[in-house]
């Protein structure tokens, strides 16, 4: 089962620290770590349109290419706030890192399925059983997408060890399918559309939507001690993101321009942005982690989400 933890994260921590303090203009400085995917467009819009400044914040958006490096950046105080996922937060808690969820980013919903299992053209895969002996690319071991694929297989009678899993960054998945290195990938937009539209692959299943109709996709995290001391800054951060989402709704073309400028692409399907994060969101992932044997001990979800956002 999935046993790789977060124990090596501290050794990969980025150097330096940024103490939160008012600027000369009275604004509060925040360094926020994100990965370059469309889920984080509200962060980029709030930066580009100076919405953070309206809410008394001086925000530096720091790109972190691998989500698995975010906990180390938080612990080393290189960033104040960083993106997180359910599996990531549970594993950091299991490893003794006291991180907490402070605000939602986006959700996976059955009404807007943006993540799927996609098979390579020429490989016949119609059901879970057809994945036996095949090689599936996932964006990172122990990522949300990785562990939920394993659960999807297990729920359908396929032991995860009957499938070969390989780490594959989203931008490389199409080429790895095309050259035959992978038989299938667990992929989200906009990379899914590119693979399907050019005929490299075809969709087998919106597997995540088959597991649950609604789940947290990603959210913002911080160190627990930092969050307890900076409730006002967190509140302003939340309010600025809420305003940015309203702006995206009202100005879709301008938002797409910001998306292309920030990430190099515009997703054909908009993520389901949501600032909500509750303990029940983590219950789903805790159940998955228990089923796959990922955690050494039970995790107190109250400590992980000290203040729920609805």
Image: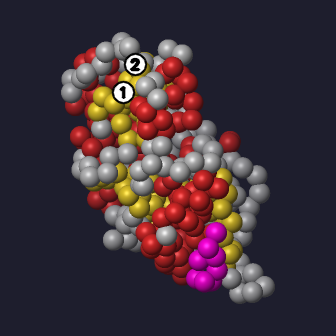
At a point 45% along the width and 72% down the height, the residue shown is 250
Labelled pair 2, 1 in contact (Cβ < 8 Å): yes
Q: Earlier in the sequence, mark 2 or mark 1?
A: 2
Residue that badge 1 annotates: 202
Q: Nearer the viewer, residue 50 or 106?
A: 50
Q: Is residue 55 highlighted in magenta?
A: yes
The answer to whether residue 301 is above or below residue 195 is below
Q: Is residue 128 highlighted in magenta?
A: no
Q: Nearer the viewer, residue 258 or 285?
A: 258
**Residue that protrudes farthest toward the left in the picture:** 156
At a point 74% along the width and 61% down the height, the residue shown is 17
Give me the C-alpha separation between circle 2 and circle 1: 7 Å
Measured as percent of width and height from the top left, residue 223 is found at 56, 62
At a point 45% along the width and 49% down the height, the residue shown is 268
**Residue 66, numbered circle:** none
At a point 64% along the width and 80% down the height, the residue shown is 53
Q: Quadrant of the N terminus?
A: top left
Residue that badge 2 annotates: 121
Neighbourhood count class around disc 2 (C-alpha, 10 Å): few under 14, some 14–19, many 20 upward: some
Q: Is residue 166 visible?
A: yes
Left or right, 123 with respect to 166, comes to left
Numbered disc total: 2
In the rendered structure, which segment of residues is drawn in magenta? 48-57
Measured as percent of width and height from the top left, residue 256 is found at 54, 59
Measured as percent of width and height from the top left, residue 307 is found at 40, 71
């Amino acid at each position: 089962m999935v046993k790789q933890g977060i124990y090596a994260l501290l050794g990969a921590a980025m150097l330096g620290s940024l103490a939160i303090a008012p600027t000369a203009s009275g604004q509060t400085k925040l360094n926020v770590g994100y990965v370059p995917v469309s889920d984080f467009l509200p962060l980029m819009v709030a930066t580009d349109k100076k919405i953070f400044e309206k809410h008394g914040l001086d925000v530096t958006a720091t790109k972190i290419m691998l989500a698995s490096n975010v906990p180390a950046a938080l612990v080393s105080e290189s960033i104040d706030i960083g993106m997180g996922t359910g599996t990531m937060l549970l594993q950091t808690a299991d490893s003794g890192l006291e991180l907490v969820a402070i605000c939602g980013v986006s959700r996976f919903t059955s009404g807007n399925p943006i993540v799927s299992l996609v098979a390579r053209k020429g490989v016949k895969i119609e059901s879970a059983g057809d994945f036996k002996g095949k090689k599936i690319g996932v964006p990172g071991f122990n990522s949300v997408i990785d562990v939920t694929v394993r659960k999807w297989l297990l729920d359908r009678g396929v032991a995860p060890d009957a499938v070969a899993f390989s780490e594959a960054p989203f931008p490389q998945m199409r080429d790895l399918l095309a050259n035959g290195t992978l038989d299938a990938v667990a992929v989200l937009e906009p990379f899914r559309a590119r693979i399907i539209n050019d005929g490299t692959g075809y969709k087998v299943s919106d597997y995540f939507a088959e597991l649950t109709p609604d789940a947290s996709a990603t959210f913002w995290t911080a160190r627990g001690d930092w969050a307890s001391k900076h409730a006002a800054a967190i509140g302003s951060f939340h309010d600025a993101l809420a305003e940015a989402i309203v702006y995206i709704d009202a100005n879709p073309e301008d938002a797409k321009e910001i998306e292309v400028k920030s990430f190099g692409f515009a997703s054909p399907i908009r993520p389901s942005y949501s600032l909500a994060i509750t303990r029940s969101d983590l219950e789903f992932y805790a159940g998955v982690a228990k089923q796959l044997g990922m955690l050494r001990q039970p995790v107190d979800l109250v400590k992980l989400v000290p203040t729920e956002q609805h």
